[in-house]
Image: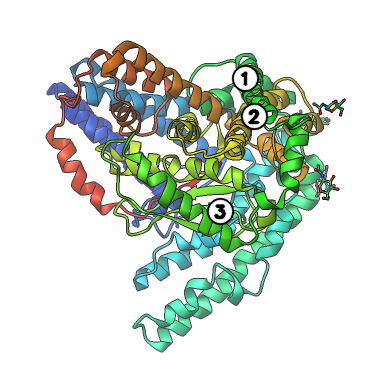
Amino acid sequence: MNLAVMQGYRFQIVILLSHLTFHTSVRGDATESLHLLLQEFYDWRLEDSPEFATYSGTYRFNDRLQAFSLARMDERREIALSFKEDLERIEASELCKTERINYRILKDVLETYLGGYRWRRYGSINPLNFLEGIHVDPVHHVEATPFFTRGDYENFLVRLENTPLQLAEYQDLYRTAIGINHTMHNVSVSRVPAQIARLLVPPEESAFYEPFTDLLDQFPFSDNAKRDMRDRAHSLVQGVLEAFRDMKTFLETEYFPSTRQKWGVGSLEDGKNYYKACLRWHLSTDMSPETVHQIGLQEVERILGLMQEIVKKQNFNGSITEYFAFLRNDTSLHTDSAEELIEGYNRLINERINPKLQDVFNHLPDLPVKVEPMPYDGPAGEYQSGSEDGSRAGIFKVNVNRPHEIGKYIMMPVTLHESVPGHHLQISYALKANLPDFRRNTEYFRYYEVPYHFPFYTAYREGWALYAESLGEELNLYQNDYELMGRYSSEIFRACRLVVDTGLHYYGWNREEAIRYMLKYTSFSRAEMTTEIDRYITWPGQACAYKIGEIKIKELRKRAEDTLGDLFDIRDFHSVVLENGPMPLTILEEIVDDWIQNYRPATAEETCTDAAHTQHVSVVLLLCLTILGVCS
Ligand SMILES: *[C@@H]1O[C@H](CO)[C@@H](O)[C@H](O)[C@H]1NC(C)=O
Ligand SMILES: *[C@@H]1O[C@H](CO)[C@@H](O)[C@H](O)[C@H]1NC(C)=O
Ligand SMILES: *[C@@H]1O[C@H](CO)[C@@H](O)[C@H](O)[C@H]1NC(C)=O
Ligand SMILES: *[C@@H]1O[C@H](CO)[C@@H](O)[C@H](O)[C@H]1NC(C)=O
């Protein structure tokens, strides 16, 4: 694959695009120019990030892998700049309201990305950690690849061939990080060698070889062709595994000794500003670390008060920590087996939550969600989205590794957060919404690159999911004091994150202080909280998105309730938030304010449903298989 040629091609696209935009602007058709630009932008994003293209069901780049280098980062900036210039040539005042939102969001996407460029020599040059990378879940990587034709196999073989090059590019980035003292803390990478070691099996047993085993037998290719493919796959997989072994050695011998000494990124040169940029990226609103920290402390106090009331009501004489220790000790509050857990989660969704959703939602998208055991030992639950035509269900992955440790009382909040009405419902609305592709389908991985990464609007997504946990209270889904304690425990956990994330990265807290703070207020074990704190150390700012996003959604709802009084319909409010898809909190606020101003019950339709949108729906139907990993 000739990179130089590909880059030339990419610039050509951009030049051609500027040309088109210019022409249409001259004709005064701002809407048409905008549509062209949105499409060109999305096409470029898919081409530039081929794995993302595959995950979202666009298969024309299945033989490519994304390129990683500092030079490439510069080129991406140039391209993003030219998109921004083209966008600014469009006369926004000529656009109708719906199109103006598209305009504003694309502008935010580009400006956020360009603003992150300044920090490219921070997170972006430390590409693998214990939470992300193909070494964490190679099965997922392979499963997202289609295997329907000979071409699919050949494409995958090319990807295998180039994987060692990608890993070599990662090593170059890491070396840059070492050279300028911008490495991660050791806890972000210390588990990676063991994760890689799990991959180092004989090639024929590797997840990367899986498509060449039984699956290949089902194809009508000649025996010779199959043998040939298997031979090539075998040696290419061997090459991939060698490259991983090499990465493992590199980490252990070169990277580890150079890892960052201090826990938080605030200790790096200009690190406090870097942290502010990460925080801004995830929150999609301006909020200082001081404010985030204060909100955290206040929220912790407030929720603690609610918890203490329940504890008192139960005549328990002791602290919250002692109360949770007491709950952990009560076997009647715990499940016995993985089966019981899966069964329990299914019952919560089907028997308790689903029947109540109509009370608070309009036009519920009918996309299926499945409960499946998590293939590794992660958080209590995770969500992975399905395809928009429903052929592949969304997956609510639940941790069944230690059933005796999972309190039944935390199952309801976890379910509300990860499945319905949390991530699954939010993403289903976005997938079904009448929105341009770039708003429906965002690349939701590689958090380490933040803030030099296209925004996926963490605060909107995670804020919604935490808001979904609070909806459970209104819907009377927490049936007893234990479940209510589970709810508060889950909420205070997200409030604590505001305190410790800013604590670690801004106020110079050490890991032990952060762990102790978490243990004081939550029901989790020290082992769980250690992994949790290591996650915050690895992804500065990410953990603050949940509570800040939820507070904003609640604030907007309150404003709508106060202004509209008897006219307020919770279902309409939820539609406005969900049918517009992920976006910055600042724009969400404007949209909700505008909706309040112009509220007309039952006919709250936008005035501008134009031909381009109708046409868009048919394009959208062809897109399938969106895979998004979402953490709790
Ligand atoms: C990196 O840190 C080491 C040890 O603290 C120091 O000797 C070196 O000068 C630093 N290098 C740069 C480029 O700042
Ligand atoms: C980093 O972690 C690894 C694995 O736990 C350990 O062997 C190594 O000594 C650590 N290095 C530093 C610099 O802390
Ligand atoms: C609660 O415990 C403390 C000491 O552990 C004891 O002094 C006190 O009397 C207890 N209160 C009740 C109401 O049991
Ligand atoms: C847990 O149960 C054991 C055995 O019943 C008991 O000795 C211990 O005090 C209990 N711990 C708590 C925190 O309730």
Classify mark 1: helix, strand or loop.
Answer: helix
Q: Which residue is mark 1?
A: 302
For the residues labelled 2 and 3, say whether their Cβ atoms are less than 8 Å apart. no
Q: Is mark 1 within 8 Å of ligand 3?
A: no
Q: Which mark is residue 614?
A: none
Q: Picture coordinates of residue 522 (x, y %)? A: 69, 34
| CA gap, disc 2 and disc 3 | 28 Å
In what quadrant of the picture does the N terminus appear? bottom left
In the image, what residue occupies the spot 56% across and 46% down?
A: 411
Measured along the vertical axis of the image, is residue 184 above or below residue 270?
below
10 Å crowding of disc 3: few (<14), some (14-19), many (20+): many
Label 2: element kind: helix
In this orientation, which residue lies closer to the viewer: 386 or 198? 386
Amino acid, disc 1 = Arg
* Disc 3 target residue: 398
Q: Give the distance between the C-alpha atoms of the residues marked 1 and 2, in whole angstroms.
A: 13 Å
The three-letter code of the residue at mark 2 reads: Ile
Q: Residue at x 29, y 24 (%)?
A: 569
How crowded is the residue under tag 1: few (<14 C-alpha within 10 Å), some, or many (20+)?
few
